[in-house]
């Protein structure tokens, strides 16, 4: 893609990518309640038609989503791919592409855009203080609801909604499962369960009684930020609430962010096993 040009409230035009001998036209759609005008660019990659960079207006503030999705004459299950605190960078986009190639309508939303550009920060402490700590669960849940609603109007099957996320996105996976009864399954990668990021928001364990979906948690035993005893407490809370569908997997001697293949914390064996479990979990639970 060459680029997109827009004004504050209206997309002016786009320069389209060339695919083989053809240019694909862009088109606009509108979700009247929460989503303003959007522009979608399809192109072909490795024989699979994908949907490209999407700029989405939420209440006058632009939200960027990467939307790779198989295009065909059938309703696709919807999978939300939620980033860590760094926003939708190439690794998260790659995860979304993997789901698209597997036949899902995959959406990776930039959920921090109202508060700032998470990808522009070099200091984690500053990023946390200036952006992440100012993003409430209520805002995130509303944006994810809007993504699901929009997907339903574009060929996604909103009766088959899955969600997966990493770190901050892992916690968000649990919280969205508590929020939206349409979520059939979630896969939370090393998402904190005993703390929140926005003052006043409840922890995952505190909301365990609201989680009715099947959520698979993938964690590392050597993750200093998520003690194993907090996972045990979550398991106890889920069972006390009657949820027998959730499952936690803890990999021995494995650190935080073991799926992030761009970081030193990457552990190939655990990442490969986790990815296989993730795909199997969604299929098992109807996503």
Image (cartoon, rainbow, N blue to C red):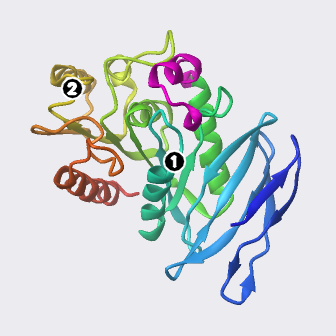
Pick whichever of labels 2 and 1 is earlier in the sequence. Answer: 1
- Quadrant where the image shows the C terminus: bottom left
Residue at x-position 24% and y-position 52%: 271
Residue 213, horizontal then vertical, whole percent: 37, 40
Residue 95, horizontal then vertical, whole percent: 43, 56
Residue 54, horizontal then vertical, whole percent: 69, 55
| Stretch of the chain drawn in magenta | 118-137
Residue 115 in view, yes or no: yes
| Separation of marks 2 and 1 at Cα, in angstroms | 28 Å
Residue 161 in view, yes or no: no
> Viewer-proximal residue, 31 or 39?
39
- Quadrant where the image shows the N terminus: bottom right
**Which disc number belongs to residue 231?**
2
- Whether residue 136 is in magenta: the answer is yes
Tell me if residue 196 comes above or below residue 47 in the rendering.
above
Disc 1 target residue? 89
Residue at x-position 45% and y-position 25%: 124
Tell me if residue 31 comes above or below residue 208 in the rendering.
below
Q: Secondary structure beneath disc 1?
A: loop
Residue at x-position 37% and y-position 57%: 286
Point out the residue furthest to the top here: 200
Nearer to us of marks 2 and 1 is: 1
**Which disc number belongs to residue 52?**
none
Look at the magenta stretch and give its main secondary structure: helix
Horizontal placement of 230 versus 210: left or right? left
């Amino acid at each position: 893609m060459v680029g997109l040009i827009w004004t504050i409230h209206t997309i002016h035009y786009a320069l389209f990518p060339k695919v083989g001998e053809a240019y694909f036209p862009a088109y606009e759609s509108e979700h009247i309640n929460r989503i303003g005008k959007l522009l979608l660019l399809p192109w072909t990659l490795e024989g699979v038609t994908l949907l490209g960079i999407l700029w989405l207006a939420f209440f006058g503030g632009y939200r960027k989503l990467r939307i790779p999705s198989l295009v065909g004459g059938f309703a696709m299950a919807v999978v939300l791919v939620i980033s860590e605190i760094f926003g939708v960078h190439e690794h998260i986009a790659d995860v979304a592409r993997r789901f698209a190639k597997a036949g899902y309508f995959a959406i990776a939303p930039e959920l921090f855009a109202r508060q700032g550009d998470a990808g522009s920060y070099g200091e984690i402490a500053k990023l946390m203080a200036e952006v992440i700590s100012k993003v409430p669960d209520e805002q995130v849940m509303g944006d994810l609801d809007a993504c699901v609603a929009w997907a339903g109007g574009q060929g996604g099957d909103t009766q088959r909604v899955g969600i997966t996320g990493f770190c901050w996105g892992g916690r968000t996976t649990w919280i969205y499962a508590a929020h939206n009864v349409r979520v059939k399954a979630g896969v939370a990668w090393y998402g904190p369960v005993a703390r929140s990021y926005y003052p006043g928001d409840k922890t995952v364990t505190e909301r365990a009684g609201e989680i009715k979906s099947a959520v698979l948690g993938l964690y590392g035993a050597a993750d200093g930020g998520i003690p194993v005893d907090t996972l045990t407490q979550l398991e106890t809370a889920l069972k006390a609430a009657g949820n027998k569908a959730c499952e936690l997997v803890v990999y021995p001697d494995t650190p935080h962010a073991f799926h992030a293949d761009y970081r030193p914390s990457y552990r190939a064996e655990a990442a490969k096993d986790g990815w296989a479990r993730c795909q199997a979990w969604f299929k098992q639970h109807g996503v």
